[in-house]
Image (cartoon, rainbow, N blue to C red):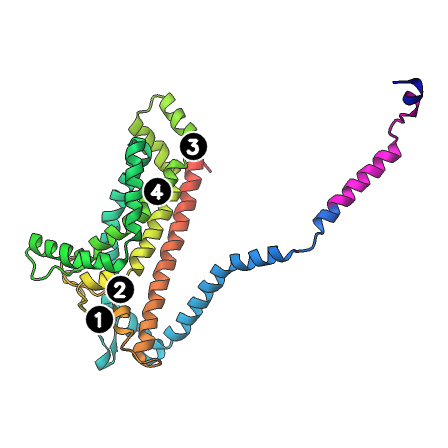
């Protein structure tokens, strides 16, 4: 480089640095003040569709269902033991009890089996076995509920009738078992993803401290994946409580309260079965029509309470695991 070229190189002055800094700040401000594009508006609208749909469904059910209170009465509707539209009797206590029985049986059977299956697939099974089990379990979720109903009616119901020596196998136990089969894929799939999402460093640290494989799974992996497992159980509960056709076909459809209360071998009539069976016969605007929508409100509230409880459990165990 020649002497003339060296002399032409100017050192940056304070004024030039301040000008460059102000220019960059102005560019940043201009970027922050960009106009809201139509793409952003469209994406925001699509994101809000689910919320809007839920609100509209709830309003529609609420408007039609609340009319049953002045027509029947809140106490008679919720705690009445007789459902007989011909006699203007619209008590749904037996339906609530039948729904709770069937769903509890399903969850008691499905949750241990599903979590055990997920642990085996994610932590123990070789990769070649996992490649077979995972699609097979998930394929169960694609089977229509009416097919499950046929399976329960012609296979499960006769088996329950024969094993327990009953006059009929259409009862709460059959309904709970068929629901358990239906919700197992949901729990297995989500629980498997939750367990596999636990960082490998957790397992390595536990094994390095001398824990066995089972101790690592039980005391490290499962607590770390507890929030995902809880979500899986809640979603399965939501599907179980809202399932209709399979329960309608195998639960018995008897408008009665089991005696004794914990007897799972008697026919029951879950709330969803009542709606599916009688909605086609109800004239729009009459008491029976409003009573069926009242049942929908009860189902909605049960699901809401379960989801809220699940969220509280997730927060509590997450804080406990993190030591907060």
Mark 4 vs mark 2: give the one in front: 4
Few, some or many residues within 10 Å of mark 3 (<14, 14–19, 20+)? few
Lower position in the chain sequence, tag 3 or tag 2:
2
Mark 1 vs mark 3: give the one in front: 3
Residue picked out by circle 4: 191
Distance between the alpha carbons at the discs numbered 3 and 2:
42 Å
Above or below: residue 192 compared with residue 61: above
Distance between the alpha carbons at the discs numbered 1 and 3:
52 Å
Judging depth in this view, the residue of 213 and 135 nearest the camera is 135
The kind of secondary structure the magenta stretch mainly shows is helix
Distance between the alpha carbons at the discs numbered 1 and 2:
10 Å
Residue picked out by circle 3: 199
Q: In the shown orientation, is residue 51 left or right of residue 192? A: right
Residue picked out by circle 1: 81
Lower position in the chain sequence, tag 1 or tag 3:
1
Q: Secondary structure at mark 1?
A: loop
Instruction: Residue 101: tell me if it is visible.
Output: no
Few, some or many residues within 10 Å of mark 4 (<14, 14–19, 20+)? many
Give the percent coordinates (x, y) of residue 178: 21, 54
Residue at point 24% right, 50% down? 181
Q: Which residues are magenta?
A: 6-28
Residue picked out by circle 2: 96
């Amino acid at each position: 480089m020649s002497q003339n070229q060296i002399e032409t190189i100017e050192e940056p002055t304070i004024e030039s640095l301040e000008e460059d800094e102000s220019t960059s700040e102005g560019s940043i401000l201009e970027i922050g003040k960009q106009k809201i594009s139509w793409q952003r508006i469209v994406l925001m609208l699509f994101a809000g569709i689910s919320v809007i749909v839920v609100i509209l469904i709830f309003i529609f059910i609420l408007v039609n269902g609340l009319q049953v209170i002045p027509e029947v009465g809140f106490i008679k509707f919720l705690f009445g033991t007789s459902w007989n539209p011909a006699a203007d009797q619209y008590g749904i206590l037996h339906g609530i009890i039948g729904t709770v029985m069937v769903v509890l049986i399903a969850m008691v059977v499905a949750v241990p089996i599903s979590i055990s299956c997920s642990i085996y697939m994610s932590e123990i099974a070789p990769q070649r076995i996992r490649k077979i089990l995972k699609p097979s379990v998930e394929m169960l979720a694609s089977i229509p509920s009416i097919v499950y109903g046929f399976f329960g009616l012609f296979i499960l119901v006769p088996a329950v009738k024969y094993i327990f020596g009953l006059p009929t196998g259409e009862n709460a136990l059959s309904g709970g078992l068929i629901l358990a089969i239906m919700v197992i894929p949901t729990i297995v799939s989500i629980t498997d993803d939750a367990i596999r999402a636990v960082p490998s460093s957790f397992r390595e640290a536990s094994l390095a401290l001398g824990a066995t494989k089972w101790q690592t799974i039980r005391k490290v992996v499962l607590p770390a994946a507890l929030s995902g497992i809880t979500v899986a159980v809640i979603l399965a509960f939501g599907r179980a409580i809202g399932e209709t056709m399979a329960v309608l076909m195998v639960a018995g459809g008897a408008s009665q309260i089991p005696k004794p209360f914990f007897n799972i071998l008697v026919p029951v009539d879950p709330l969803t079965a009542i709606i599916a069976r009688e909605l086609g016969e109800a004239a729009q605007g009459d008491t029976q029509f409003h009573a069926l929508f009242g049942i929908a409100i009860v189902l909605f509230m049960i699901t809401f309470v379960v989801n809220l409880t699940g969220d509280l459990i997730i927060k509590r165990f997450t804080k406990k695991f993190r030591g907060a």
